[in-house]
Amino acid sequence: MRTLMGSSKFWLKLPACAATAALCLSTLPQPVFANRPRDEQENRPRRVEDQRAEYGDDGPSIRVGLMTDVTNVTLSSSSRLTVRRSAGDDDNAPTVVAGQMRVEVSHGRVRENQPVYRVEVAAVSDPRRAGRITEAIKKEFDEPSSTIYDDESAKHRVLIGRFSTRSEATEMVDRLRHAGYSEARIAAQPTPVPRYSEATPASNQQLGRAAKTRSVDASPAAKVETGSSAGLVAFEATRLITSSENLLVVGTSQPGVEATKAVRTTEDTSLRRGVPPRPIPTVRIANRDYRGEIHLVLNSRGKINVVNVVPLEEYLRGVVPLELSPSSYPEIEALKAQAIAARSYALSTRGRFTREGFDLYDDARSQVYGGLGAEQPLTNRAVEETRGLVAVYPNEDGRLVPIEALYTSNCGGHTENNEAVFLTKPVPYLRGVECRADSEASSDRQLVSATSVDTLIGSDGRSKAREVSLLQATGFILPRPVTLQYMRAAAADAELQSWTARLAGLLGRDRPNRPPARWPRLIEFISTVSSALYGEGHARLLLPASEINYILFGLSPDELPGEARADTALLVKDGVLRLPGDLQLNWQVTREYAIETLARAICLKAKGANPGAEPASSKLAPGIYDSIALSAENNRLLVPAAAPTKIEGRFRSFPSTAPNANATKSEAARTSGREAATLRLELETGAKLFRRLGGESYAADRIPLRGGERVKYHVNSGGRIDFLEAEASAAAPNDMSANTAQWRERLSVDEVKRRLARFRFAVGEVEDLIPVEYGASNRVVEMKIVGSDRSPTLRGQQVRSALGLKESLFVIERERDESDRITAFVFTGRGWGHGVGLCQTGAYALAKVGYSYLRILQKYYTGVRVQKVY
């Protein structure tokens, strides 16, 4: 699967079976099959029956593989640990009072309370060197060896053998010293927590994740033959406390379902009362705490598989926050959809790795699981509020079963059919869909105005309708209509004084008091606008002289004398003033130039979310606001009402209690887990609407809003929007708001060759990569590798896996040398993951525009139903 916390991205492989869990059934609602013949109705899918009696409130137990093929493991707990020889052996279970124990593989008979001596070969700081020593002595002396980390000395200690007498240990010390290991000595048995435990050289991946190894076929020498005396032994310090042929069960002093219920009740009650909850009894392995029990299973390769056995609902608490981060995606409906998908996947794949002693891996091969330390309040809420809910679909026998709910980090705008990626039988609920809100919903999310569209092209070929409409909306005196002849004429002194006075009034500043013109008209206009925008004489205080000289390089003091240099520099720096192309400042100001400058000044000071807390009877002019749109509804703009501010100055805005403000707690606000209000602002019938694309604004009679657009709008004295500009997002699909949506990667031909070789594609020299077939979402589902020796074909998941790419939704550009030979491939793509099933960032975007968890699930999983199974 995948995770959205910061950083890690994952995928999983789809097995051939679409769903394996079979549940009891009853009848679906009749209208679904009303148009089918009676004989087909008799074979229709039946409803999943309540499984509470079988599963309990927390669902069935899930066995999660935490580690595979380790030779020893250390377990600890803040409370007492219990260890049993089997899952049902509750009587007289030995208790480790110290709260720490170690389990190892034994290849000889052991007796309880038998003293054990071990020999320390070396203690080194470098973990890789420790791994090499361990591997060497294991081969040379054929004795069980391991590497553990000693926190006290900060060294990796290489240990060999388990001897019942001191003389046997002394004999091994002599053998080691004779072989050149001069530091060998009998070790006082330590009780540290191992940083890694596999007796092989540690790779970067192993060091990055404590004690985790991949489950791979062992060499013939490592396999356990029938009749072998291999088993598991558990120690507290040097004391042998118990042993078993194939299974040890470790838990805390409060095991069982009743304790789990008590813990959850304590947590929930403590949160409601605002007090810290009592510590939860957990077992700690490799610096992670886990609820439930730990099963230590001796596998067929003679090594230990470490398994966490935990109720499904408790398991999901450690899965959902790692698969969809609540801090990055705080929409409760999206998190609920993720919880149901994870629950459905766990039930459908339960028992898949029974031969290894577990149901699911704790990483991207199944679902990422982090135990107690991964849990978050918002995702715990999502799990609790969907308790027992599962997405189901009829299997080949017509029985409703949990779906194998695959999901991907970011689908790049369109999900893919499962067979195109995983080369398996088509699954009816894993069909590719466009990742956006449904068309019938998006048509409602538009703002529509009855006014006619006026382009009003200026002398530079750009439309000036936005600037004129903004000034008209904010109370500037302009003729109606404004003509091109009027715009291109020089502005009169009275007009400039009136307009700059209006600007100062909007910003809550005193009217600029300018003496008769001493300089050319443009310079006077610059100084007056600066005074209205920043305050009289403030420009020279806001910019140091060195910065002023740098900005105005090329303009001589004669052209721009005195304080006007600071005024001009600050206006240019803030993007308010556009200097003439020839940098000559001795020309008169046209109305077009003045209107454009004043509009930029107003937008510079547009701040904050939306109208806030000014009494509706205020005589002060309403303002222009800058916000992020949530959506549109019934020709109303939806924006967040939190932290309301306005353009700088003394006028404020409308209160949330004003009749026309329409402030309510919206579904979007509630689903985010925050109690912020959403403001619904009604559009004036003749409002001026503008859409900003590529840095330019264009007049429009309607504007679509899917959420996330930056909007500038003006609220008139009636509380309605009469001017609005929305900046269109460059990416249309819902999931494209994520920073993982678009990517680019350059690979040299040598790097491509190395990556292919890791997947056993030896092709000689790579000459070209040729996409052969595309899927329903335009993903590359078949690619030919043209090599000097071989030209194999990559199919499905191999395309991105073998090339090491984030997604298979990409285009290829080729770099060539002077002889026209390809030297590198540049991949430009969208998305992150395998692209099948639920798109996680898309689910978040849908939740933001009001989709429920049910609509989200039915959007990505075609034809499924959601039912409570326990």
Image (cartoon, rainbow, N blue to C red):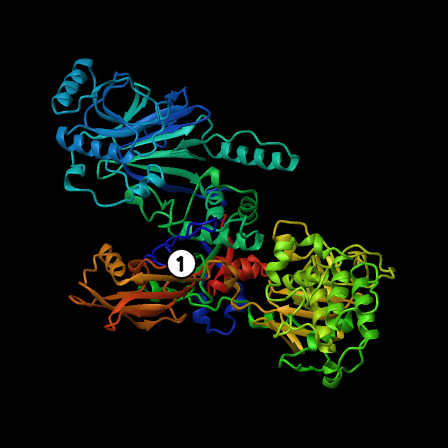
User: Where does residue 151 sit, x and y in percent of width and height?
Assistant: 37, 26
Q: Answer whether residue 359 is visible to the viewer in this image.
A: yes
Quarter occupied by residue 684: bottom right
Q: Is residue 104 left or right of residue 283?
A: left
Q: Residue furthest bottom?
A: 485
- Residue at 70% of width from left, 70% of height from top? 597
- Tell me, yes or no, if residue 626 can be seen here: no
How many C-alpha atoms fall within 10 Å of the one at disc 1: few (<14), some, or many (≥20)? many
Q: Position of residue 275 (x, y in %)?
A: 63, 32
Residue 177 or residue 636, whichever sits in front: 177
Q: Position of residue 422 (x, y in %)?
A: 33, 62
Count of numbered marks:
1
Q: Left or right: where does residue 492 sit relative to residue 581?
A: right
* Nearer to the camera, 203 or 172: 203
Towards the viewer: 358 or 732? 732
Quarter of the rendering containing residue 705 = bottom right
Residue 306 pos. (x, y %): 33, 36
Identify the secondary structure beneath mark 1. Answer: loop
Q: Amino acid at mark 1?
A: Gly
Above-or-below relation of 511 to 486: above
The residue that mark 1 highlights is 833
Direction from residue 546 to residue 119 in the image, left or right: left
